[in-house]
Image (tube, rainbow, N blue to C red):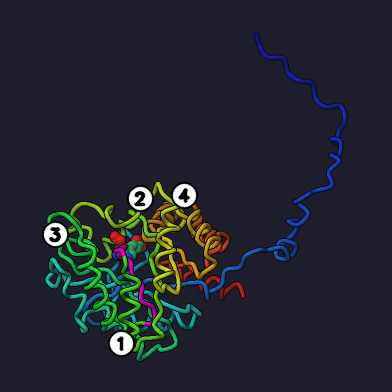
Amino acid sequence: TPMPVPPLRSSPKPERLSLVERPRRNRKSEWARRLVTENVLTAGDLIWPIFVRDGVGERTPIAAMPGVDRVSVDVAVEEVARAASLGIPAVAIFPYTDPALRDPTGSEALNAQNLTCRACRAIKEKVPEVGLMTDVALDPYTSHGHDGLLEGGRILNDETVGLLVRQALVQADAGADIIAPSDMMDGRVGAIREALDAAGHLDVQIMAYSAKYASAFYGPFREAVGSSGTLTGDKRTYQMDYANSDEAIYEAELDLAQGADMIMVKPGLPYIDIVARLKNQFGRPTFAYQVSGEYSMIMAAALNGWIDGEKAMVESLMAFKRAGADGILTYFAPRMAERLRRER
Ligand code: PBG
C-alpha cells in the first residue's frame, strides 16, 4: 500500500519563528562578515620549506609533490628572493644529498661544505633579510634513512645527540638563524642550546619539533630528500604514537624547559587538536607543519578536479590560525602569499 501523501500547507508563508538570536545576521554580506572575522592569515605567518640539490641552474620536479621542485643553490637564492618580496619571513632548507655521500653515521651532516651549509651561505649573502631555518636530524645523510645512529636495529639516543649538536653548530656557523631539531631524541634541545651559547651563537633560535608523530603523511618528503627507498623499518621508537596527546604536552614542556624558543606540531591538520592544546597550555610561540602528504592530498584532489585547490589551501591554512598557531610551515607559502598580495 502506498504511503499517504501529506497535505500541502495552506498558508503560502510559513510562520515567523520567534527567535531573538539569529547568528546569520552577522553573515548577511561581505562587509558584515569581514567585520566579525576572528582570525587573519598574513604572509608573516608563513615559513616556506625548500628542497635543495647539487648543480647549477637545476630544477627537478618531485613527482609526489606537484608544483614543488628540488632546486640547485643558485636557483634557491632566486626563489628565496621571490619569497622575501612576497613578505614571507623565513624559509626552511632541506637537502637532497647525493646517495654516494650517505653513510651509516650520516657524516655528511657534519661537513661544513654540505648542501645545507652552502645554501645557507649563498642565501645569507644575497637575501639577508630572510630568516633561515635548518633541520637538525641525520636522515637526509644516512644510508639507512633514520634520523639517528642505528646499532643492532636500535636508534642510539645519547650518541645521536652528540652528532646533532655538531650538526647544529655547523649550520649556525653557516648562517642558520633558527635551528630546528626534527629528530625526536631525548635531551637534544638542551644540548644544542648549551653548545650554541658556548660557541657565541646566543641569538640563534631553536624551533623544536616537539610533537612530531610517526606519520604516513611524510611519504612525499622522503621521496623529495631521497630517503624513502633506503628507510629500513619505521620511526616509532623516536617519533610519537598518534594515539597520544598528553605525551605532546610532556614533550613540549621538556623542550621549553631546555630552551626552545618556539615549539612545533607535525603533521598539521590531522593534529590540529595538539596545536590548540599546546598553545592553550603554554602560551608560547607555537607552529604547525602542514607536511608533504597534506600538501600532496590537496594537490592530487585539485588536479583531478575533485576539489578547488586554491580554496582548500586557504581553508586549511586558516584552520591553523584558528587553532592558535603563530605560524605555519607550508609548501603553499609562496602561492598563499601571492594570493594575499592580490587580495590587498
Ligand atoms: C626529517 C624530517 C621529516 C620531515 C621533516 N623533517 C621526515 C621524517 O621525519 O621522516 C617531514 C616533512 C614533510 O613531510 O613535509 N627528520
Closer to the chain start, of discs 2 and 1, is 1
The answer to whether marks 3 and 4 mark residues whose Cβ atoms lie closer than 8 Å is no
Residue labelled with disc 4: 306
Rounded to the nearest angstrom, the CA distance separating label 2 from label 4 is 31 Å
Classify 10 Å Cα crowding around label 2: few (below 14), some (14-19), many (20 and above): some
* SS at badge 1: loop
Of helix, strand and loop, which mostly describes the magenta segment? loop
Q: Amino acid at mark 1?
A: Ala
**Number of numbered discs on residues:** 4
Classify 10 Å Cα crowding around label 1: few (below 14), some (14-19), many (20 and above): few
Give the label, 2 or 1, closer to the camera. Answer: 1
Closer to the chain start, of discs 2 and 4, is 2
Q: Residue at x 38, y 71 (%)?
A: 49
The answer to whether marks 1 and 3 mark residues whose Cβ atoms lie closer than 8 Å is no
* SS at badge 4: loop
x and y, in percent, of residue 159 in the image: 20, 68
Q: Which mark is residue 241?
A: 2
Quadrant the N terminus occupies: top right
User: Which image quadrant for residue 98?
Assistant: bottom left
* SS at badge 2: loop
Residue labelled with disc 1: 199
Closer to the chain start, of discs 4 and 1, is 1
Give the label, 3 or 4, closer to the camera. Answer: 3
User: Which image quadrant for residue 129?
Assistant: bottom left
x and y, in percent, of residue 61 in the image: 30, 67
Which stretch appears magenta?
177-186
Q: Amino acid at mark 4?
A: Trp
Q: Which mark is residue 151?
A: 3
Q: Amino acid at mark 3?
A: Glu
Vertical side of 139 occupied by 245: above or below: above
- Front residue of this view, candidates 8 and 295: 295
Rounded to the nearest angstrom, the CA distance separating label 2 from label 1 is 35 Å
